Amino acid sequence: MTYLQQLLQDQADRKSYICAGVDTDDEKMPKGRSGQLLGRGSLKSRLLYFGKQYLYQLFDRTCVCKPNLAFWAAYGAEDTLTELIQYAHDLGMQVILDAKYGDIGNTARFYAKTAFERFKADAVTVNAYLGSDTLDPWLDYGPEHAVYVLCHTSNPGAGEFQEQMLSSVDRQLFVHLADKVTAKQKDGCTQIGLVMGATFPEQIKLLHGVVPDDTTPLLLPGIGKQEGALLETIRNARRYPFVVNMSRELMYAARNRHFAQAAAAKAGEYNIRIAEVMAATA
């Protein structure tokens, strides 16, 4: 089964469009009476405990998970992340590694090897602003894998560069990038998707007619703590296979030993909201 086929199947089975972010921040994670993170043993063991408890409660309420590499590498916990990814797979979850890799030629080849062979992620976020040719090393891993290319991000300053008008093609830079990178999609190659921030829902609409509807998955960060507009985002994204990423809104729904149950409850609330929006925008 391809990455996209599995994603659509998981969405249907779990009735969820939520991507569960896994961004471990020891300043925000719940602590016990001792002041240490919940769990036992080393810091890495406690990070793994948090991640496993969190995913165990969420795997049937979300369609995919997305650990951010920076939040694990900061603690020297890359091997711990590898173990968590395997645990997610054991639960039947696909994994998007949020690494935002971006480099040329041979370096990109080794980034791809890191993401897909070392971490064994199913998908990864990448940066193609160095040129669409930098995607080539990623595309040899087959349709059971995917890359989500940064297109229009969710941060307040995203438009500073990404929305610059290119006079040569009479379109904004992020739209031109979306066109160029999705044009590289071929049968049998790695699935190409796009990252589009939910804090800029009107920019999603500008992709209409530019990139293929049914075969361009979108990763939509910014709902939740960044206060993206859910209704407008889904109205403009629903023609594509989309997932709504939620990280802090789920991970820190409670800062006590019931954190995982609170995350599951919050995901359930958002599943209902998203279902209502999908019905309203049909």
Image: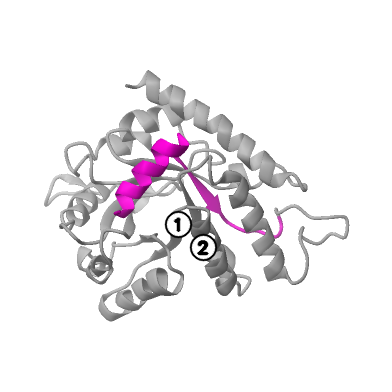
Task: Point out the tag, 2 or 1, that comes first from the N-terminus.
Answer: 2
* 54 relative position to 21: left or right: right
Find out whether residue 12 is within the magenta segment.
yes
Secondary structure beneath label 1: loop
Q: Is residue 197 visible?
A: no
Given the image, on which type of amino acid does mark 1 rest? Val
> Depth check: 142 or 151 in front?
142
Q: Residue furthest right?
A: 33
How far, Cα to Cα, is label 2 from label 1?
Answer: 7 Å
184 is higher (above) or lower (below) than 201: below
Find out whether residue 138 is within the magenta segment.
no
Counting from the top left corner in percent of width and height, residue 180 is at 18, 55
Residue 205, quarter of the rendered image: top left
Residue 113, quarter of the rendered image: bottom left
* 50 relative position to 272: left or right: right
Q: Badge 1 is on which residue?
A: 95
Q: How many marks?
A: 2
Q: Residue at x 76, y 61 (%)?
A: 39
Q: Is residue 102 visible?
A: yes
Secondary structure beneath label 2: helix
Counting from the top left corner in percent of width and height, residue 269 is at 57, 30
* 95 relative position to 174: left or right: right
Marker disc for residue 85: 2
Given the image, on which type of amino acid does mark 2 rest? Ile
The C terminus lies in quadrant: top left
Q: Do the residues bearing badges 2 and 1 touch, measured as CB atoms within 8 Å? A: yes
Q: Residue furthest left?
A: 168
Q: Residue at x 39, y 49 (%)?
A: 153
Counting from the top left corner in percent of width and height, residue 115 is at 41, 69
Q: Which residues are magenta?
A: 1-27
Q: Residue at x 30, y 51 (%)?
A: 193
